[in-house]
Image (cartoon, rainbow, N blue to C red):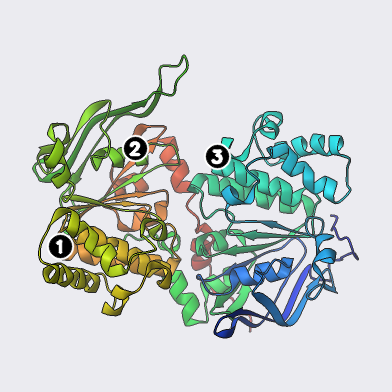
Amino acid sequence: MTYFASEGTNDLGTPVLDISGLTIAYRDRSGSRTAVHGIDFTVNPGEVVALVGESGSGKSSTAQAIIGLLPQNGHLESGRIRLNGQDIARWPQKRLDSIRGSVISLVPQDPGNSLNPVRTIGEQVAEVLTIHHRAPRAAAYVQAIELLERVGLSQPALRARQYPHELSGGMRQRVLIAIAIALKPSLIIADEPTSALDVTVQRHILDLIDDLRREYGAAVLLVTHDLGVAADRSDRLVVLQNGRIQEQGRTVELLRNPQSAYTCRLLADAPSLNAAPQRSSAHPFETAPAQEDDIVVVEGLVQEFDIGGKDAGFRALDDVSFRVKRGTTHAIVGESGSGKTTAIRIVSAFQRPTAGRVVIDGLDLASLRGETLRLFRKKIQLVYQNPFGSLDPRQTISAIVEEPLLNFDPQPRTHRLERVTAVIEKVGLPADVLQRRPHALSGGQRQRVAIARALVLDPQILVLDEAVSALDVTVQAQILSLLDGLQRELGLTYIFVSHDLAVVRQIADTVSVLQNGKLVEDGLVDEVFGNPRSAYTRELIEAIPGKKYSIALRQPPSNAG
């Protein structure tokens, strides 16, 4: 096995990465704020070490400091960063440029923002080879195509000629991996490399990183908030909270016997590590739902889009039917492009289907027009994936939550503010948030505001479109608990759209599985997850992370020590 370094070599006795006493601070108008407090850990050749914790724990700051890419207001206060035995902590940027890509490389979180939109894929992969003088331009382009093939992209010569927007998210992430491994570095930092990807694509990407690690002997620092991914993919875990290491150790041993209260909470809150359903809807499903109590009835939905040219069109939905019982949670799952978003847009009356019908609480949506259609939207409200993007940054929280009342339910201002205050309290936020703006709130607080805005009109149905997928595991658990409490208190019906089957398994009563616009499976969650009929559903379930954790719990504890 070969290990790669540009300034010195490594051997099996020297860690690829040795962090000691690392302290990172950020300067702002109020002075200096310490984000990472004197942490120590190592990563050995061929090893995967997972750095886990919530937002603000210091994970990304640590990764950025290692590769020398801290923001301008960030600085290293103290500590050492030894790469293959050499301390690179205070190297100037020009010297760091010589080892970025060749000795240490980064697979960033967001492939959409990490590739140049006006350059072809082949040019961007070849660039790392030419910058480090490993090949002239023509030869580098040939090697780039070989790299694209190596990371599993179909038709690599075609992909090399394409631009980032022409590739899917998973394909773009493979391109970033091709760039990261091009020079066979000693250390790959994978910073939330799959957080925005479907569960099956996530598994393929993580398998790819693992295969390349074994092939090239590289060490991997996996930065993630997903404890299921960390459990399955790492040899050792380093648990960070508020910039301090709570504990670290061999993954299996740490999972089986966590020592810190914080790690125990992370494990308890991670849906992928807790297979037992925790549903407590207003109408538990002991038998199949009675049709007379179906608040949502979807029958034979077809949605076609004209894509121009000679083709007849694209069929986004193809004869999709499902029913949702009042006061329960129905999940719609599937990969990107499966038709989930199209389905909920039709159910929410934002678009009309090519064929089929939707009946909401006895109202056929096809019969609604004008003012009747507008008023219908009080009955069903949406909560989107990204609360920061769906909240007006210029408005106060009070104005954001009040706005639906101005549109649908005119009444004296004092009455409106009473309702706004009441619903903010109902979602567990203090009254003093009303005068703040979205940027002053955490991600979990912003999602609570989005839920409050949806609830202020007293709807019967909430459509939750990936509403917890962007949240840390503990915040996600808090929001799911909130939704469960609101459902029981208010008798709400939820349509829960998600690619995270671990969350679906935990909170939904019934589920529809979509693949390429077709319904491949439908029924009670326990039945679908316990005995899936379709190969596609089995693949989705198999891709849920956390199997290593389950194995760890079944193993007897070590007697060592």
Where is mark 2, residue-wise?
342
Using the rendered image of the protein, determine whether residue 280 is visible from the camera's viewpoint.
Answer: no
Residue drawn at the location 48% of the way across and 79% of the way down: 262
Quarter of the rendering occupied by the N terminus = bottom right
Of the image marks 2 and 1, the number of the one nearer the N terminus: 2
385 w.r.t. 95: above or below: above
Q: Residues within 10 Å of mark 1 (few under 14, many from 20)?
A: some
Residue drawn at the location 47% of the way across and 42% of the way down: 539
Residue 341 position in % (x across, y down): 36, 41
Q: Secondary structure at mark 3?
A: loop
Looking at the picture, which amino acid does disc 3 mark?
Ser
Looking at the picture, which amino acid does disc 1 mark?
Leu
Residue 430 position in % (x across, y down): 28, 78
User: Which residue is most to the top?
Assistant: 310
Q: Secondary structure at mark 2?
A: helix
- Front residue of 176 and 51: 176
Where is mark 3, residue-wise?
168
Residue 219 numbered tag: none
- Front residue of 207 and 410: 410
- Front residue of 50 and 387: 387
Looking at the picture, which amino acid does disc 2 mark?
Thr
Q: CA distance from mark 2 to mark 1?
A: 27 Å
Where is mark 1, residue-wise?
490
Q: Residues within 10 Å of mark 2 (few under 14, many from 20)?
A: some
Residue 250 position in % (x across, y down): 63, 71
387 w.r.t. 37: above or below: above
Instruction: Tell me: 504 left or right of 408.
Output: right
Q: Are marks 1 and 3 in contact (CB under 8 Å)?
A: no
